[in-house]
Image (cartoon, grey):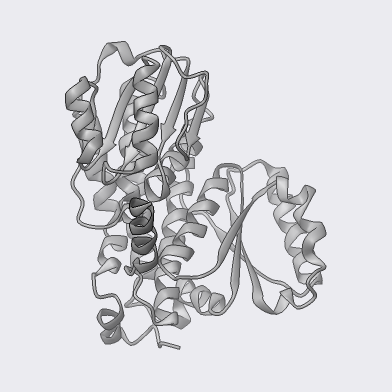
Amino acid sequence: MMDLDKLDHYEDIDRAGMLNRILNLPTQIREAWSIAQGYQLPNAYLGASHVVICGMGGSAIGGDLTRALVEPEMRVPVQVVRGYDLPRYVGRDSLVILSSFSGTTEEVLSVAHQALAAQARVIGVTTGGDVAKLGRQVDFPVVSFSFDGTPREAVGFSTFLMLGILARLGYVSDPTTQVEDAAGVIERMSVELGPDVPTDENSAKRLAQELSSKIVVIYGGGHLSDVARRWKGQMNENAKSWAFFEQLPELNHNALLGYKFPSEAEQRMMVVILSSSLNHPRITLREEITRELLGAWGVRARRVEARGKSRLEHVMSSAWYGDIVSYYLALVHEVDPNEMDLLTFFKARMQGA
C-alpha cells in the first residue's frame, strides 16, 4: 500500500497529472460560468414544457448534478436520458440539451437526430466533434469549451454550462453569487485535504485507506442522491474499484433486508453516507438509523458531511470530496487513475461490430 504522504511517488503513478485537474475545479467552474453568461441563446428556446438532458458517463453526471440543483425552482420537469432513444413525449415544446464531451458519443448522436426529427429545441454542450458539426449543419446553438482532460474531470464544465443555459433562458434565477461561493468552498477544501496535508490530519486520505480492498456502496439522499452516483463512477474509473450507489429514502424500503446474506459480506463491504443539513430532516434521521443497522450487522460505515450554506455548495463540495477520495484510493491501489484500457478495448469492439 502506497504511503499517501510520500509526495514524490505521486507522479510515478499519476503520470497524466489528474491531481492538478481535481484541485483546479474552482477555476473550471468560474470559466464555465463565464462562458455560459456570455452566450446568447434564441428567444425561441424560452418556455419549454420540459427539459431533457442527454449524455453518458462523465457528460451525463453534469446533467444529474444540474437537475439536483434546479429541481426545487424549476416549474417544468427535467429528465436525464442515458441511452439511444428519447421519450416519445419529446416534441416542439421540448428543450433537449446534448451533453457530449467529445461530441462523438454514439448514444448522444442517436438522440440528437431523434430530437431534430421531433422538431425539439436543441442545444449542444461539447468540445467539438459530430455534435458541433451537426449544430453548424442544422443551425442549433452549440456551447463549446476546451479542456485538456477526460470527460469525468470536466464536471465543472458540464454542470455549470448546463446550469448557465437554464439560468440564461430564465428557467431558474441567476445563481452567480452561489456559483462563486461553491468555487470558494472547494478552494478551502483543497487546502484542507490536499496532498501536502498529512494523513493524520487529512480525512480524505484516511477514508481512502479505509476503502482499500473494500466493495464500496455510497448512500445519498435528496439533493445528494446523484452525488452518490458521481462517487460510484469516480470509484470505478479512477480507483478501478467495484462500487455501487443507493438512494435514500428508497434503500430503507428494500436494501436493509439484504444485509443478512452472504454472511461474509461485512468483511468486504464499506458504506459511505453522504449527508447534508439542507436535506429533509427525515432523511437525516434515516441516515442515522441506517448507520446503526449497518453497525449491528458488522458493516463499516462512514458519514461525509456536505460543506457550505447553499444547495449548490453542498452538491459540489460533496462531489469534489468524492473526487479527491477516489484519487487517493487509486494511489493506495498503486494504479494510474488516468488509465482507461478496458474502456478503450470495449469501444474498439463496439466500433468493429
Q: Residue at x 66, y 72 (%)?
A: 269
Residue at (39% x, 21% y) in the render: 95
- Nearest to the observer: residue 68 or residue 194: 68
Number of callouts: 0
Quadrant (top left, top right, bottom left, bottom right) of the N terminus: bottom left
Against 68, residue 192 (above or below) is below
Q: Residue at x 21, y 34 (%)?
A: 132
Give 214 or 115, whichever is nearer the viewer.
115
Residue 264 placement (x, y as % from top left): 75, 78
Is residue 256 rendered to the left or right of residue 165?
Answer: right
Using the image as rendered, state which of residue 302 and residue 129 is in the foreground: 129
Vertical side of 212 occupied by 279: above or below:
above
Q: Is 314 left or right of 196, judged from the image as shown?
A: right
Quadrant in which residue 130 is drawn: top left
Q: Residue furthest front?
A: 353
Nearest to the observer: residue 118 or residue 53: 118
> In this rendering, is residue 286 above or below 75?
below
User: Residue 323, how many percent across, how many down?
Assistant: 41, 62
Pinpoint residue 108: horizontal percent, then vertical percent.
Answer: 37, 37
Left or right of 138, for residue 243: right
Question: Is residue 12 visible in the rendered structure shown here?
Answer: yes
- Whether residue 174 is visible to the viewer of this picture, yes or no, is no
Which residue lies at the image location 57% right of the left edge and 50% below the top edge?
Answer: 276
Q: Percent x, y for residue 44?
A: 30, 11
